Image (cartoon, helix red, strand yellow):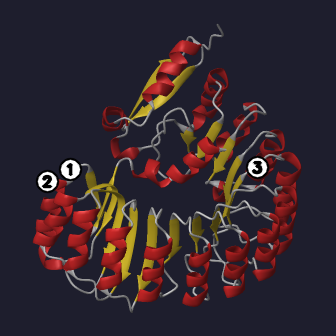
Amino acid sequence: MERISDPIKIKMGHATTTVRIISAENVRKILKAWDFDKTVINSWYNDVEVPVEENDTFYVARIAILCGMKHFHASDCPIINAPHAKIHLRLTDKNHAWMAVFPSYLYSLNIQTAALFTSYGIASLKLLISACHSLRVLAISDIVDDELVKIITISCPSLRCIRLSSCDGVTDDSLELIVKTYPHLLSLDLGGDSCPISDAGIKSLTQSCTELQAIDLDNCEYITDKSIEYIANSCPNLKKLGLICCNTITENAIVALLRCCTQIETLLIPECNVSDKTISVITESCPQLRALDVCSKILTDEPVIALIESCRKVEDLVLHYRNMTTSVINTIAQNCPVLRLLDVECDQELSVDSIGTLLRGCTIRGHLALPENVTLNSDIDKLVSELAPHLMKRSPGIWISKSWDIYSIRDELELCQNI
């Protein structure tokens, strides 16, 4: 059995423990200890710190190879490991070159700290991608341009899921290259800051990639209703649509899409200012709905209550509208025994009693955001700590669990497992 004599330093809260790995069996024991487990979280992740020090990437990579790990995730965010799925750490220029030790069988690569890279780090990343011929899932933020897209399409012929978030260098030309290379693409995320993709690019995408199940177009400010029409006509298996900050998209386009794409599970349309009509169509057409994000000045309670009562699989619920009353809160408590995320915003201040009713009827596992009630803040804080002790106050009106980061990457993990 291969032996490793180099020590590995593991963050345990604010202290550092050195562990000497002597065999593959012990390596597996340590990786198993990083599983999503409350006891481990409470003892190892004080303030939810990243567990592996930056300088130890080389050792972690060697562990990964020894154990046959096929997924790697690097992120700015505090991370807790998912069972046997990924290695999580902050990736910067200082340790990026060590990632070259990963073999060509790497299955998924998620680099969400690319904005920290210098030209050296970017060059190393290009070399890494060039060696990852078996990738199925690739996620990169901030630095993707036409040149890197060309490298990706040449080096990674088997990609099924691509996330190019916050990449304003991705153009219609890049998208044309992607769709020609990956006709069986399942998921594409182009959300970012002022992404220059246009209706022409979306037309090319939907004509070539008819198996798409997830499309995120957040901040794609140049697309219009035409893009939504192309998606509706060509992607019957669509399960996720993200249109955050796409305020050029009209309600009529969204309604037409919902009537064509009846397998929608995740719908993120907070800037589209939809009316009761859209909520009613969601209720009728999306029985598998799991996540909804809407923000509107003109919604009323009646269709929202009907949706909550009908769509019993909802796990993530973001409702921002002025005229929401405690009737909606009570309906959530009665019909949603477990939610991963709940974010409500309205003009009416919620009473301690209504929040108590909510928390007694509904377990919020990951993220809770409520309208701030200045006069009752201390009472609400006390109530949340009593009824939802797993939630920690992050800021006024917002509470999160230590496991929130693992919930936030759940969809990607599921895609990895299903491919």
Amino acid type, residue under disc 3 in the picture: Leu
Place of residue 47 in the rendered image (x, y in percent of width and height, measured from the top left):
35, 46
| Other residues around mark 1 within 10 Å, as few (<14) / some (14–19) / many (≥20) | few
Label 1 belongs to which residue? 389
Asked if the residues shown at circle 3 and circle 1 are in contact, with their CB atoms under 8 angstroms apart, the answer is no
**Residue 153 position (above or below residue 23):** below
| In-image side of 53 versus 94 (left or right) | left
Q: Residue at x 39, y 91 (%)?
A: 297
Q: CA distance from mark 3 to mark 1?
A: 41 Å
Frontmost residue, 12 versus 332: 332
**Residue 319 position (above or below residue 60):** below
Residue 195 in sight here = no
Asked if the residues shown at circle 2 and circle 1 are in contact, with their CB atoms under 8 angstroms apart, the answer is yes
Label 3 belongs to which residue? 159
Q: Residue at x 70, y 39 (%)?
A: 107
Frontmost residue, 153 versus 328: 328
